[in-house]
Image: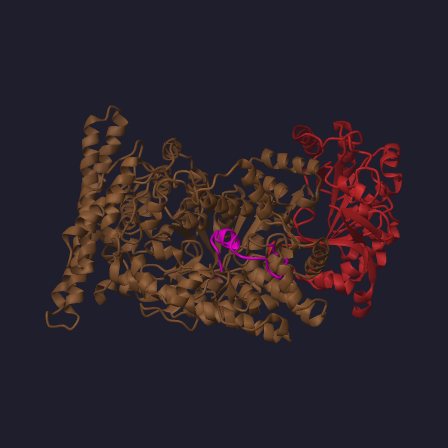
Chain colours: A red, B brown
C-alpha cells in the first residue's frame, strides 16, 4: 500500500522551503501545476497551464513544470522536519496551481506526509466536485480556501469561473474539515470596497466552525513572469492597496466577528 | 523562573550621551605614548615586567582625565570622545607612514593634529628596534615571512598590536576590589623564599602586580577628586548631586568591593577601560555580565535602593561607554575589522556551571540596553541551549528584527562538549563566554590568543595550479604540473600538501609573535585578574593562565568545496575539461574584465609609480591605464570557451543547498584546515585550535586572490565564515542551515560563523518571531554552533541592485509570496525597497 502511495506521480513547478505565511509554523510549499481558474491578478501565472512551459527570467530560459513521485517530494519535505516540530505544527502545504486538479497525487502526498507525522495544509480555490475534495480532507489539518467574491458575475469576469460551486463547497468543507480558514486576495477594481469585503466576511462567518479570515493585499511581484511566459499582464496599471485601506478592511472583517489578519 | 518582561523606558540622558559621542570624527591622542616613553627611558636595564608596571603607573598618574557631560559612569581613555591612544611598544612604523592619510582613508578614518604628529614622531625615535613586531620578525622563519608577503595568511593582528582577547575575573574585583588582589599577592610574597629557583621571576612579577593595582586605585581617586571639584562649580543642582555621587563611588571602587549596583557598574567600567590603556589588544570581552552583575542588582532592587529604570539607565551608560573606547589600526587591518570595532563581546543567558538555566532579569535588560543605545558596542551575544526559556529567545528575536545585527546566537549543546574536548572541566566549559567575534572560552582562566591569524584556504589551491609559484617566486612546495595529474586523489593530495606547508608556516609566525609578546610586553595588570598567574608568578603572556590556546581562522570553505567539487566532477568524472584548461581559464580570469574597484586600485599604484619616476601624467593617461587594467585581453573564441566552462560550473550543485554529497565533501574540505591544526603547540604550553570565520577579512583578502575553480572571479570576495558562497544557496534558509550544520563544528573549537540575511517581513508579528526562533533551534538541534542575522536594509537592497551576482539567493517575502530579489525588474525592486523603508528597518 505504502509503495503505491509513494509511487503516485504528479506535476509540480516548485518546492519552496521555509515558508512562514501559508499555514502554521515553518512550512514547505509544494506548488502544483495546472489550475481551472484564470485570475487576472494571479502572481504565479506559470502555475496555470497543465502543460510544461518555459519561462525567461533575467534573460535565462528555464523549464517550468516537472513530473515527480510522492516519494521524491516527501524526501524533500522531510529535510525540514526539525524546523516543523520546533515551530510547533509546521509542515507541508500544497499550493498551486490547484491541488484539487491532481487529486490522486494530492491525496497520496497528504496521506503519506500525515502518516509520517508531518502536519498538512492545502491552499485551494475550492473549485472541484465535492466528492473529489472529500478524498483529500481526511489527510488535511488546515484548509486555506479562497473566497474571492460573493457576486457571481464579477467572479466570472475576473477569474473566468462562476463562484456557485465554490460557495457550495465552502459550506461542505466547513462541516467536514478539521480547520478551515478563509482567504481573500484584496484586488483594487475587483473586491476592495468595504461592502464587498463585508459580504465575503458575512459569508465566512456563516460557515460552521470558521473563525479566521485573511486578507492578502494585491501585489504585482509576479508581473514580470507574464512577459517571461510571453503573455500580457492586464493589471499593470493597478497599484497595491494602501496600508490605511487594508486597515479599514481588516476592521470590516473583525466587525463581522472573525479573527482577521493581513497577509497569511 | 519568572522574568520581568515589561518594557523599561529609556532615560533622556542616553540620547544626549550618544549624540555627544558621535559629534566629531575620532582622533588620535599622544599622551599615553609620551608618558610610556618617558617611563621606559628611566627604567633601562630593569626587568621587563617591572618596566611595564612602572610605565603603567606613570601613565595612570599623568594621563589627562575627563568626565563628559551627563555621564554617570566615568573614566575615559582619551580627552576626546571615541579617541584612541597609541601603543608604540607593539609597532609604530605603519602609523608614521599613514600620518597624512589616516584622516582620509575610507575604512575607519581618524583625525590627527599636527601637534600630535610631531609628538609621536619624537617618541618614535626611541622605539626603533624595541617593539614586539620587530622582535617577532627576527624570530620568524624566512619562509614564513615570504608566505606573509605573498598573502597566504595574515598574522597582522598580534604582529602589530597587543593581544587582548581575554575575559578577566570581573566578579572577583567587583566582590573584593583590588584590595583582594593585593592581599593575595602579599601572601604569595610572604610565602616565596629568596632561595627558590624561580624567586627572581616570581618576586618581580608579584611586585609588578602591586605597582599596577596601586596605580589603578590612585587613578580612580583622581576621578573622585575631579568629580568633587566639578560638583563645587556645577551650576545645575541636579548635576551637582550626580557629580557628588560619582566622587563618592570613585573613592570606594575599584579599591574596595562594590556594595551597590551603582558601584559594581563603575568598578566594572574601570577594569574594562584600564585594560585598554595597559595594552592595545582588542576583543577584551565583558563576558557573562548578566551573571556577575545580578547579585548587586537583586540586592538593591529588593532593598528598594534602586528602581528598574535606574538600573537600566546605568546599564545603558555602560553600553555607551563601551563605544567611547577606540583603536587605530593600519589601513589594511582597518578594512578587515571595519567599523571601529573593539569586539567587546558581552553575552547573556545559557547555563550556569552546574548545568541549570542561568537566564535572569539582567539578561532581558541587556537586550533592552542594546535597543536603547543602538550602537556597535558591546558585541552582543546570547547563549542558547535546550532549556533556554522560550520568552527569552523571542525577546532576542525582537532585537534581531530591529536590524542591528545583534544578538549573535551560540549553541551551548555544541560549545560545551567542544571545550571539554580541549581539556576544560565540565564546570568550566558550562561557564563559557564568547571572546571577540565567535571564540568560546572560560573567563578568568584562559589566554586564548583567539584571533591569531587569517588563513585564506583558497590560496593553497592557487598554489596547486601554479606548482607553488606566486608572482615568479617559489613560495610553496612544487607539487607538480597539474597537466600531468591523472586522478582526483592526486590533485587533492597536492592541495593537502600545500595546505599543510602553509599551515606550518603560519604556526611558525604565530609562535614567533607569541614569544615576542612574552619577552617584550608582559602585562601585569591584566595578568593579576586571570588564574593562575599570581600562584605561578608569571604573566599571561608567559603562560600564566590555566588554559592556553592559539586560534587562527581558516576561511573560504564554501569556495574550496565548490572548487574541488567542480574539478572532481568536470575533470575526473565527466572528463569534460582538462586541468590544463582549468589552469588557463583561471589565469585568464575566465575571460572576464577585472573587478572595477580592483582595477581602480591597480591604476592608482601604477599612476603613483609613474609620477614617482618623474614623468608627467594626464587625465587621459590615467583613464587609459584604468581601461587597460580592467579589460580582459582573451580572444573572443577563448572567451566563449571560458563561458561554457563557467556555465558548466554554475550548473553543479553547490554547498548550501542541503545536498548530502556536496555537504559531506565540505566537511572533508574543512578538515584540511582544522585537523592539521590539532598537532601544533604554542610557547605558553597550550595547543593550537582552529576557528572557521573571517571577521570581514574575506573581502580584502579576496582582493588578493586570483580566480578559483568554483567560478569565482579574481579579486572578488571569498565566502563569509562557514556560510555558503554569496548567491549560491538557492533553497532558502533551512536548506543552507542544514548544509552548514553538516560541517564538524566541534573540531573548530575556536568558533565558526554562520551569517544569514533576512528581509524584515520574515520576522513580522509574533508568528514571524516564532518561526525565526524555530529556525535557530532547528539549526542548533543539528549541532551548528553559531548564527547571526542581517535583517536586510534598504542599503543592502540598493547594493543588490548594483551587484546582483552577490545576491542571487536573496529572497524577499511579501505577504505570502516570495521572490528572488535579483530576478525582479527594476520597477518591482523599487517597490520592495520602498516597502522595506516603510517598515522602518
Magenta stretch, main secondary structure, is loop
Q: Residue B156, percent across and down? A: 39, 56
- Between B532 and B256, the one lying in front of the other is B532
Q: Residue B22, percent across and down? A: 39, 34
Q: Is B447 part of what is drawn in magenta? A: no
Q: Quadrant of residue B223?
A: top left
Q: What residue appears at the point 31 percent right and 59 percent down from the top-left corner?
A: B444
Q: Is B706 part of what is drawn in magenta? A: yes
Q: What residue appears at the point 15 percent right and 64 percent down from the top-left corner?
A: B203
Question: Is residue B714 visible in the rendered structure shown here?
Answer: yes
- Vertically, is B68 above or below B496? above
Left or right: where does residue A101 sit relative to residue B642?
right
- Vertically, is B740 above or below A58? below
The region drawn magenta spans B692-713
Q: Quadrant of residue A85?
A: bottom right
Q: Residue furthest left?
A: B194
Q: What residue appears at the point 52 percent right and 42 percent down from the top-left corner?
A: B403
Q: Residue furthest top?
A: B235
Q: What residue appears at the point 77 percent right and 61 percent down from the top-left corner?
A: A111
Q: Quadrant of residue B719?
A: bottom right
Q: Residue B324, percent across and down? A: 35, 41
Amino acid at each position: 500500500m505504502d509503495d503505491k502511495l509513494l509511487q503516485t506521480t504528479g506535476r509540480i513547478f516548485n518546492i519552496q522551503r521555509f515558508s512562514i505565511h501559508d499555514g502554521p509554523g515553518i512550512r514547505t510549499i509544494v506548488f502544483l501545476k495546472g489550475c481551472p481558474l484564470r485570475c487576472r491578478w494571479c502572481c504565479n501565472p506559470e502555475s496555470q497551464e497543465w502543460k510544461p512551459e518555459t519561462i525567461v527570467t533575467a534573460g535565462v530560459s528555464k523549464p517550468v513544470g516537472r513530473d515527480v513521485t510522492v516519494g521524491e517530494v516527501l524526501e524533500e519535505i522531510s529535510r525540514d522536519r526539525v524546523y516543523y516540530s520546533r515551530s510547533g505544527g509546521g509542515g507541508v502545504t500544497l499550493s498551486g496551481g490547484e491541488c484539487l486538479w491532481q487529486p490522486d497525487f494530492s491525496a497520496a502526498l497528504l496521506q503519506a506526509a500525515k502518516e509520517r507525522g508531518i502536519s498538512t495544509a492545502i491552499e485551494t480555490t475550492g473549485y472541484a466536485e465535492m466528492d473529489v475534495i472529500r478524498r483529500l480532507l481526511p489527510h488535511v489539518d488546515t484548509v486555506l480556501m479562497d473566497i474571492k467574491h460573493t457576486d457571481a458575475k464579477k467572479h466570472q469576469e475576473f477569474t473566468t469561473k462562476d463562484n456557485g460551486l465554490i460557495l457550495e463547497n465552502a459550506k461542505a468543507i466547513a462541516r467536514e474539515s478539521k480547520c478551515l480558514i478563509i482567504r481573500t486576495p484584496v484586488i483594487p477594481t475587483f473586491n476592495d470596497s468595504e461592502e464587498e469585503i463585508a459580504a465575503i466576511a458575512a459569508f465566512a462567518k456563516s460557515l460552521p466552525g470558521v473563525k479566521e479570515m485573511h486578507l492578502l493585499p494585491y501585489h504585482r511581484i509576479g508581473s514580470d513572469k507574464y512577459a517571461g511566459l510571453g503573455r500580457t499582464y492586464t493589471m499593470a496599471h493597478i497599484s497595491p492597496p494602501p496600508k490605511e485601506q487594508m486597515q479599514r478592511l481588516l476592521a470590516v472583517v473583525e466587525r463581522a466577528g472573525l479573527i482577521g489578519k493581513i497577509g497569511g | 523562573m519568572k522574568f520581568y518582561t515589561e518594557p523599561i523606558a529609556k532615560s533622556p540622558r542616553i540620547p544626549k550621551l550618544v549624540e555627544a559621542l558621535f559629534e566629531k570624527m575620532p582622533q588620535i591622542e599622544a599622551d599615553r605614548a609620551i608618558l610610556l616613553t618617558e617611563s621606559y627611558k628611566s627604567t633601562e636595564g630593569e626587568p621587563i615586567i617591572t618596566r611595564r608596571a612602572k610605565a603603567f603607573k606613570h601613565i595612570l598618574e599623568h594621563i589627562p582625565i575627563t568626565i563628559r557631560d551627563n555621564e554617570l559612569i566615568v573614566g575615559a581613555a582619551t580627552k576626546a570622545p571615541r579617541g584612541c591612544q597609541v601603543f608604540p611598544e607593539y609597532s609604530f612604523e605603519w602609523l608614521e607612514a599613514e600620518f597624512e592619510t589616516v584622516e582620509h582613508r575610507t575604512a575607519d578614518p581618524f583625525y590627527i593634529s599636527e601637534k600630535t604628529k610631531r609628538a609621536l614622531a619624537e617618541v618614535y625615535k626611541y622605539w626603533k628596534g624595541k617593539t614586539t613586531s620587530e622582535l617577532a620578525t627576527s624570530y620568524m622563519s624566512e619562509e614564513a615571512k615570504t608566505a606573509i608577503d605573498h598573502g597566504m595568511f595574515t598574522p597582522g593582528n598580534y604582529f602589530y598590536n597587543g593581544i587582548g582577547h581575554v575575559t578577566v575575573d570581573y566578579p572577583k574585583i567587583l566582590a573584593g576590589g583590588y584590595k583582594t588582589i593585593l592581599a593575595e599577592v602579599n601572601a604569595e610574597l610572604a610565602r616565596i623564599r629568596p632561595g627558590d629557583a624561580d624567586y627572581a621571576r616570581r618576586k618581580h612579577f608579584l611586585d609588578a602586580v602591586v605597582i599596577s593595582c596601586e596605580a589603578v586605585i590612585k587613578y580612580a581617586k583622581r576621578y573622585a577628586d575631579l568629580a568633587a571639584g566639578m560638583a563645587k562649580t556645577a551650576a545645575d543642582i541636579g548635576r551637582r548631586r550626580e557629580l557628588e555621587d560619582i566622587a563618592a563611588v570613585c573613592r570606594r571602587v575599584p579599591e574596595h568591593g562594590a556594595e551597590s549596583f551603582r558601584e559594581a557598574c563603575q568598578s566594572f567600567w574601570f577594569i574594562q577601560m584600564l585594560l585598554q590603556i595597559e595594552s592595545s589588544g582588542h576583543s577584551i570581552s565583558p563576558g557573562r555580565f548578566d551573571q556577575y552583575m545580578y547579585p548587586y542588582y537583586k540586592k538593591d532592587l529588593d532593598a528598594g535602593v534602586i528602581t528598574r529604570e535606574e538600573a537600566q539607565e546605568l546599564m545603558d551608560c555602560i553600553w555607551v561607554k563601551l563605544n567611547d573606547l577606540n583603536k587605530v589600526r593600519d589601513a589594511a587591518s582597518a578594512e578587515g575589522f571595519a567599523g571601529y570595532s573593539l569586539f567587546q563581546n558581552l553575552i547573556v543567558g545559557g547555563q550556569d556551571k552546574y548545568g541549570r538555566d542561568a537566564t535572569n532579569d539582567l539578561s532581558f535588560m541587556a537586550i533592552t540596553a542594546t535597543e536603547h543605545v543602538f550602537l556597535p558596542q558591546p558585541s552582543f551575544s546570547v547563549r542558547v541551549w535546550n532549556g533556554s526559556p522560550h520568552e527569552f529567545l523571542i525577546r532576542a528575536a525582537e532585537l534581531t528584527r530591529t536590524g542591528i545585527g545583534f544578538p549573535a546566537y551560540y549553541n551551548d549543546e555544541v560549545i560545551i562538549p567542544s571545550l571539554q574536548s580541549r581539556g576544560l572541566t565540565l564546570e568550566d566549559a558550562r561557564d563559557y563566554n564568547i571572546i571577540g567575534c565567535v571564540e568560546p572560552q572560560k573567563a578568568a582562566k584562559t589566554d586564548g590568543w583567539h584571533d591569531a591569524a587569517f588563513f585564506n584556504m583558497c590560496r593553497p589551491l592557487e598554489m596547486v595550479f601554479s606548482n607553488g609559484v606566486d608572482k615568479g617566486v617559489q613560495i610553496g612546495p612544487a607539487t607538480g604540473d597539474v597537466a600531468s595529474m591523472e586522478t582526483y586523489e592526486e590533485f587533492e593530495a597536492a592541495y593537502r600538501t600545500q595546505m599543510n606547508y602553509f599551515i606550518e608556516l603560519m604556526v611558525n609566525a604565530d609562535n614567533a609573535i607569541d614569544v615576542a609578546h612574552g619577552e617584550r610586553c608582559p602585562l601585569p595588570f591584566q595578568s593579576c585578574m586571570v588564574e593562575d598567574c599570581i600562584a605561578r608568578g608569571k604573566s599571561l603572556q608567559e603562560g600564566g593562565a590555566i588554559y592556553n590556546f592559539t586560534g587562527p581562522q581558516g576561511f573560504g570553505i564554501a569556495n574550496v568545496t565548490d572548487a574541488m567539487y567542480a574539478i572532481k566532477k568536470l575533470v575526473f568524472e565527466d572528463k569534460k575539461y582538462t586541468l590544463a584548461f582549468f589552469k588557463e581559464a583561471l589565469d585568464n580570469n575566465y575571460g572576464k574584465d577585472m573587478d572595477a574597484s580592483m582595477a581602480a586600485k591597480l591604476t592608482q599604484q601604477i599612476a603613483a609609480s609613474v609620477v614617482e619616476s618623474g614623468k608627467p601624467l594626464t587625465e587621459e593617461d590615467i583613464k587609459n591605464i584604468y581601461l587597460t587594467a580592467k579589460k580582459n585581453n582573451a580572444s573572443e573564441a577563448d572567451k566563449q570557451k571560458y563561458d561554457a566552462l563557467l556555465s558548466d560550473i554554475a550548473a553543479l550543485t553547490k554547498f548550501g543547498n542541503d545536498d548530502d554529497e556536496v555537504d559531506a565533501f565540505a566537511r572533508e574540505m574543512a578538515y584540511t584546515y582544522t585537523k592539521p591544526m590539532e598537532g601544533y603547540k604554542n610557547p605558553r604550553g597550550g595547543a593550537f585550535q582552529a576557528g572557521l570565520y573571517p571577521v570581514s577579512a574575506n573581502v580584502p583578502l579576496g582582493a588578493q586572490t586570483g580566480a578559483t575553480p568554483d567560478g569565482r572571479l579574481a579579486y572578488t570576495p571569498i565566502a563569509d565564515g562557514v556560510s555558503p558562497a554569496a548567491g549560491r544557496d538557492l533553497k532558502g534558509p533551512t536548506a543552507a542551515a542544514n548544509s552548514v550544520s553538516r560541517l564538524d563544528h566541534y573540531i573548530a573549537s575556536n568558533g565558526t560563523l554562520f551569517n544569514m540575511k533576512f528581509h524584515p517581513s520574515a520576522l513580522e508579528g509574533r508568528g514571524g518571531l516564532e518561526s525565526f526562533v524555530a529556525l535557530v533551534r532547528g539549526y542548533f538541534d543539528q549541532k551548528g554552533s553559531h548564527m547571526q542575522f542581517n535583517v536586510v536594509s534598504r542599503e543592502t537592497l540598493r547594493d543588490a541592485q548594483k551587484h546582483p551576482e552577490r545576491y542571487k539567493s536573496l529572497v524577499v517575502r511579501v505577504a505570502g509570496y516570495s521572490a528572488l530579489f535579483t530576478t525582479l525588474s527594476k520597477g518591482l525592486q523599487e517597490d520592495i525597497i520602498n516597502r522595506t523603508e516603510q517598515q522602518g528597518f
